[in-house]
Amino acid sequence: MIAPILPKPEGLADQLRGKIDHVLIDRMNYHYADWIYRKHGLEYAMTEDFFTQKKKELTSAFERGGIRCQMLF
């Protein structure tokens, strides 16, 4: 399982190819940890637009790598 989705996860599918056959991906819904995003200037990664874009990118990357991918959001 991959959670939370943080910026720049695009290379993850290549790194996991041959090591796994299925991945579950979820977003960070732990609002008590929002301060971590703010501390590191990652507020943009808390938006619906960010999650929508990463959902598309990750689904495509894992499918190209032959890894089943299930999004939990």
Image (tube, rainbow, N blue to C red):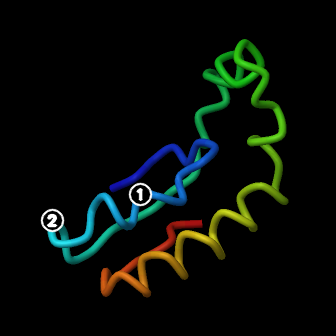
In the rendered structure, find residue 42 and report the number of the disc placed on it: none
In this rendering, is residue 29 above or below 53? Answer: above
| Dot 2 alpha-carbon crowd within 10 angstroms: few under 14, some 14 to 19, many 20 or more | few
Q: Quadrant of the N terminus?
A: bottom left
Give the x, y percent position of residue 18. Answer: 16, 72
Q: Quadrant of residue 6?
A: top right
Q: Quadrant of residue 34?
A: top right
Q: Which residue is mark 1?
A: 12
Viewer-side residue, 54 vs 13: 13
| 17 relative to 19 in the view: left or right | right
Do the numbered discs 2 and 1 sit on residues whose CB atoms are within 8 Å? no
CA distance separating discs 2 and 1 = 11 Å
Name the secondary structure under disc 2. loop
| 7 relative to 60 in the view: left or right | right
Viewer-side residue, 65 vs 49: 65
Q: Tell me the residue at 54%/69% (across/down).
A: 58
In this rendering, is residue 53 above or below 56? Answer: above
Q: Quadrant of the C terminus?
A: bottom right
Give the x, y percent position of residue 38. Answer: 77, 19
Q: Which residue is mark 2?
A: 19
Give the x, y percent position of residue 70. Answer: 43, 76
| 20 relative to 56 in the view: left or right | left
In this rendering, is residue 22 above or below 42? Answer: below
Mark closest to the chain's N terminus, 2 or 1: 1
Q: Amino acid at mark 2?
A: Lys
